[in-house]
Image (cartoon, grey):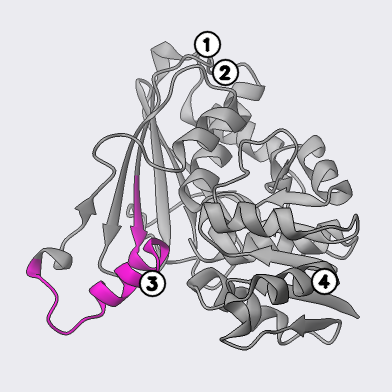
Amino acid sequence: MIKVFIDGSAGTTGLRIRGMLEKRADVSLITLSEEARKDTAARKDALNAADVAFLCLPDDAAREAVSLVENDNTIVIDASTAHRTSPAWAYGFPELSAQHRAAIAHGKRIANPGCYASGFIALVYPLIAAGIVSPDYPFVCHAVSGYSGAGKKVIAEYEAADRPACYDTPRLYALGQQHKHLPEMKAVCGLTRTPVFNPYVCDYYCGMTVNVPLFADLLAKRMTAEQLEEVYRAHYAGQRFVKVGKEPSGYVSANTLNGTNDLEILVNGNEERILLTARLDNLGKGASGAAIQNMNIALGLDEGVSL
């Protein structure tokens, strides 16, 4: 029986992880009362008793939780941003490369990717790895997400009966270009220039698209949209949860992968300008689904269990 403790199980990510694990016959959840969840000694005992500990916490609390683990056996999967650029932690996106998958399979410290970052990195990492785009390319990224990715406070604001009318429209944020996902987007892809990132929170619950436009004449290797599509097919060949496809409708909806752990890559455009799009569930491959997948890999199980 796999003993699992979710530190921060009351949040959106923690609740979905718990919901998936409660259906499994091979998992025993370690739970704490409301009072005990605020007790450091009780949390420490739970963390050290677990085979796998999910941290669904703010960054500082996640760092504190890691410091409480005193054994060499507990696998820690951190859903916060605290360790995503740390070389001592495996970056939990196994489809990026054989090295990423091996680091997850053999590691005890796994940083779960951010939702926006998952889309951007899925698009950009293969291009950098293949030498198609140089690390100093001036990337711009536009993304839209449902409001569930913004946390409990914002969810409550969107679902309030008396909310302001401005919540009815897409809202651009991170105007100072300091979004918390930017460091991992830059570091994991090996970029020397920080992207311009324009995220929008929108009036629907979950699902996201992450869009990266390219100028064909600025590529290190000039390629058409069709050729780039083949690059992605080759890079992600054999990967269960990353798919390369077409959108025949002419419209890319953000919520069509909701409830799955899939990430879909779409390549559109013309000879001069190419548009790359990643579509995913921000609570699936962008959060809880990825965390469960990483757990399965770290334990040597089929990566698709529960997914």
Mark 3, other Cα within 10 Å: few <14 / some 14–19 / many ≥20: some
Q: Which residue is mark 2?
A: 132
Q: Residue at x 81, y 35 (%)?
A: 99
- Disc with the residue nearer the chain's start (1 vs 2): 2
Look at discs 2 and 4 and give the one toward the viewer.
4
Magenta highlight range:
143-165
Q: Position of residue 132 (x, y in %)?
A: 57, 18
Q: Secondary structure at mark 4?
A: loop
Residues at badges 1 and 2 in contact (C-beta under 8 Å)?
yes
In the rendered structure, find residue 152 and report the number of the disc placed on it.
3
- Disc with the residue nearer the chain's start (4 vs 1): 4
Q: Is residue 182 left or right of residue 124?
A: left
Q: Is residue 152 magenta?
A: yes
Residues at badges 2 and 3 in contact (C-beta under 8 Å)?
no
Q: Which residue is mark 1?
A: 220
Q: Secondary structure at mark 2?
A: loop
Q: Which residue is mark 4?
A: 50
Look at discs 2 and 3 and give the one toward the viewer.
3
- Disc with the residue nearer the chain's start (2 vs 4): 4
* Amino acid at dot 3: Lys
Query: In the picture shown, does residue 44 fall above or below 92?
Result: below
Q: Position of residue 188 (x, y in %)?
A: 61, 32
Residues at badges 4 and 1 in contact (C-beta under 8 Å)?
no
Residue 294 showing in the rendered view:
no
Q: Residue at x 88, y 58 (%)?
A: 71
Q: Residue at x 77, y 50 (%)?
A: 109
Q: How far apart are the two marked residues, 2 and 3, measured between alpha carbons?
A: 40 Å
Q: Secondary structure at mark 1?
A: loop
